[in-house]
Image: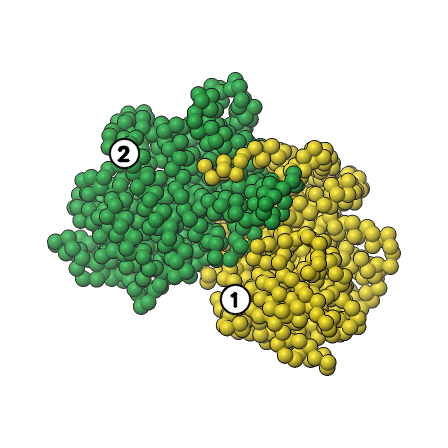
Chain colours: A yellow, B green
Amino acid sequence: MPDYKAPLRDMRFLFDEVFDFPATYTAIGANDASPDMVGAILEEGAKFCEQVLAPLNRSGDEEGAQWHDGVVTTPKGFKEAFAQYVEGGWNGLAADPAYGGQGLPHSLGLVIAEMVGTANTSWGMYPGLTHGAMSAIHAHGSAEQKDTYLTKLTEGRWTGTMCLTEPHCGTDLGIIKTRAVPQADGSYAVSGTKIFISAGEHDMSENIIHLVLAKLPDAPAGTKGISLFIVPKFNVNADGEPAERNGVSCGSIEHKMGIKASATCVMNFDSAKGFLIGEANKGLNCMFTMMNHARLGTGMQGLCNGEASYQGAVRYANDRLQMRALTGPKAPDKPADPIIVHPDVRRMLLTMKAFNEGNRALAYFTAQLLDLLHSPDAEQVAEAEGLLAFLTPICKAFMTDTGLEVTSLGMQVFGGHGYIREWGMEQLMRDCRIAPIYEGTNGIQALDLLGRKVLGSQGKALRSFTKIVHKFCQAQAEHPQLKAQVAELARLNQQWGELTTRIGMAAMKNPDEVGAASVDYLMYSGYVTLGYFWLRMATVAQAKLEAGSAEQAFYQAKLATAEFYFKRLLPRAGAHLAAADAGSEVLMRLSAEHFTL
Amino acid sequence: MPDYKAPLRDMRFLFDEVFDFPATYTAIGANDASPDMVGAILEEGAKFCEQVLAPLNRSGDEEGAQWHDGVVTTPKGFKEAFAQYVEGGWNGLAADPAYGGQGLPHSLGLVIAEMVGTANTSWGMYPGLTHGAMSAIHAHGSAEQKDTYLTKLTEGRWTGTMCLTEPHCGTDLGIIKTRAVPQADGSYAVSGTKIFISAGEHDMSENIIHLVLAKLPDAPAGTKGISLFIVPKFNVNADGEPAERNGVSCGSIEHKMGIKASATCVMNFDSAKGFLIGEANKGLNCMFTMMNHARLGTGMQGLCNGEASYQGAVRYANDRLQMRALTGPKAPDKPADPIIVHPDVRRMLLTMKAFNEGNRALAYFTAQLLDLLHSPDAEQVAEAEGLLAFLTPICKAFMTDTGLEVTSLGMQVFGGHGYIREWGMEQLMRDCRIAPIYEGTNGIQALDLLGRKVLGSQGKALRSFTKIVHKFCQAQAEHPQLKAQVAELARLNQQWGELTTRIGMAAMKNPDEVGAASVDYLMYSGYVTLGYFWLRMATVAQAKLEAGSAEQAFYQAKLATAEFYFKRLLPRAGAHLAAADAGSEVLMRLSAEHFTL
């Protein structure tokens, strides 16, 4: 892993200058999150990630999680780092104070998660899954369940998992086979096999609390017959402490392309004692309530690996001497010029920078919406809910697809040295490749966006966002330096609606039109969305420069990167538009056999 | 590794129906390569690759090449497979009969190499490097050198390497430090360190013949002072047999993202006895003569991994049951439909199919040009040389970049199962990732195409190809089924020239304009080139259907894939055009420090 330096300046730019987080924090009554406090938290978080987690990244990959006879051992230092993380208060940062948390805004938790995931993606999976379990229990658990589990989870004494996937189903949870049979004492005997369970077994905590999707004996078929159960690794006794082992065990762990230090477990439930959480047959709904949070977190992985790759690539491009600049030597005292003088190396670096910083803006804007769900203003909550539903699949899919491109470009800057383990660049790409797959594949995200969210709301979800873009474009239409880009954004924004109408019309006749267009529709959406955020950043940067800011270089770089995005990346929207418009006929015409000829 | 089945039908389609290889073979006097013989060779080659090499692919990855105290051991079965390969006559297929080869056309050798590389990329590196060394010795060696080395290399008793890269230089060979000091006996003492040497040390042959770039003591600075030397692992005695060990040893092997069974060696030369090959200070020219061949071979790796990924993905998409088709159940007797019913899965499969088959057409057309270098018709040779120079960087870069996309899409079709080792899909992506890097990074290919080939010839190299496309479009302008696509190709073909003129004009004022545009220029070129080949294939398929061919499904699939390519992939050319037109200013404006802010 290349050394990690948290991009605190860029984070503060978004927090304070672009999105005005202080105002949001005031609005939701998060009074502890004063600007000074936020600054201190970010700096302390950065230190922990840079100094504790980053140094464990490569050794974690080399060592990997190890399974032996049902016991999983995490790489050297992982357990100790988790203890430090908990000790530092990071695990409970955004957790409910009623259960030992600090009650700080979720957006702040996500920024810390960004740093954690950039420093050490595999390690970040353990607290990440715990936070997911905590959210589910907090939202749907009974008072007793909250008392039993939440404080221990916040204290990091216990950790959590989410057990959804089975060998024969991932996306199609309606056909899960895990069964939960009611017992005389009100508990359930849960039996079945779950696969791909991150943090399903490990040595970092005293107990592991599994949240398990299963079917009751009389459950209706399909997704309407799925219930959610709490199944602890060790049953909890009357004192609230772990007692005897429950009927759940780890059968093996997967050997994967990357995130090797994250234990991906096969979990066998054999009449394990479980407890229904939320209503019977409403398990999928319970899962969905925290989906926005988890999907934004997964989208962030694209940014995390992309940021780490960028930092490595910039450092290498300044150090590596190779060839002379075509415009004449730039380092005549050296045997060759640093490769950052070459335009194509800069093209790669600027592509990385433009996606990373654009994706960060998208992620933080979305995280701010998560905070606004806690606003006392019902209208504000409703607006945030709508935008969140719309932007979440874009965050997840666009940020991980472009994140993978960015991570791969970083390797390319290194040439052959990028392909060997030594420099850490190839690990980033192996780690990043899972992000477009898990937490709902990017294809599923695209169906969620176009089918469920946009067409499912007759376009209302789209308009909630295009309206914002439209207003921005109107307000900035005469911007002295940026009006050409504003006009281009306005054009794409209008096309977005027109494209949606065309697909919607076609889909009324043929439902396959949705799936035929969805991924390109999502990518089109992502490019336009990032165009909006880049222009917002550019207008702020331009204003700061004109106001005589002392940080000329920072704001000039923002303006140049915005220009680069508009000139060299945003034109890809046109290709996605054409593909999304191409219709389903050419896809569906072939028989399955045609594909194998 | 998913089971491999060589796509013989598609290969024969290109050989016999699209490109008329029989006529070329007749023209170059390759009378042994009759259509029947070619058919038999392809079938036997397929059997060997499917039955011997493919089963060693995954075990080779798991085991990897192992280094111990200077000795490199290849994975179990590799050595025996090489013996079988040699025994079957595959190693000498396209080699000179004067030295034990069969003298068959190079194109046939490349098709066999495609099958080898698809079945087992790592294994294919060993004979691949040997063939490179054989070409260099054949083209530039003295009669005595040919006698000493070529027959042994053809017989597979010895193998070869190419030693170019050093720790501080890869692209920039002008600054190599390896030195060759003349000795009294006419040999040279070669000293220095070479890295990233594929097949530098292993247990598959009795001797290893290194071709080493080094500098003579009085050599001019830069690339004009590089000479090429033959340095055998074991010195060769008067009988032509290996004698005492030479001063060359393997210091270590690299731990890489993929192609783990291919030994990537650090080679230490310590006053090793070497022999000048070709003229002093002309070593780089010697290397360049075989560059076209090697770069086409590397481009092919994109196709190889892409083809393997496609075969795995199609099989999985037919087997994996998940969700129902939106148009109603297609397999009502099963718990869910096979995922190939879903439009987005088909989009992924068709993207893979369109790139693979289009890239195969590009590669075979280019391989045919390699054959035509042996034509007795001087004009034909000159034309082939020009086209080859132009198409080779496109083959190398476009085929590996799109090959990586294809390979990644295959993993995506598998969802989470694509990310674990079990199914072999993640290995393909790890193996494929090197291809855009080695044999000259894709950025270097783009500079070669735009700077050296196209602008360096004042556009002549481009016109040699656009003229062919133009003539085709004119001839097919009224094609009843395909005229819309023909018109689109003609439009892009014309834009290609206009874009080139614009960049050329700008580059006269500022040489950085070349590097700023080059990669997007190459990608634009690749998309248009594949558009041409897809239309050629489509016109043949349409004619066959109209002639009442019994293979309706095969030709219908070709037509549908061509249409898919034009509707959904070719529009990307527009995005590359815009980026190539964007100019260097936005790239060069930032100082190196701006990138790290």
Residue A506 % position (x, y): 69, 33
Instruction: For label 2, count other residues whose C-alpha is less than 10 Å away and answer few (under 14), some (14-19) or many (20+).
Output: few
Going 51% across and 70% down the picture, which residue do you hit?
A67
Instruction: Check the picture and name the quadrant holding the C terminus of chain A.
Output: top left
In this picture, residue A244 sits left or right of residue B271: right
Q: Classify residue B229 as left or right of residue A313.
A: left
Q: Which residue is mark 1?
A: A252
From the top left corner, tell me how far across and down residue B545 is, in percent.
Answer: 46, 24
- Quadrant hosting residue B236: bottom left
Horizontal side of B143 relative to B139 (left or right) equals: left
- Circle 1 crowding by C-alpha within 10 Å: few under 14, some 14–19, many from 20: many
Q: Nearer the viewer, residue B86 or B345?
A: B345
Which residue occupies 79% across, 52% down?
A385
* Near-viewer residue (B484 or A560): B484
Residue B142 seen in the figure: no
Q: Which residue type does callout 2 highlight?
A: Met
Instruction: State the separation of the CA atoms marked 1 and 2.
Output: 51 Å
On screen, A44 above or below B114? Answer: below
Give the numbered dot on residue B37. 2
Residue B362 can be seen, yes or no: yes
Which residue sits furthest bottom? A239
Type of amino acid at the residue the image marks with label 1: Ser
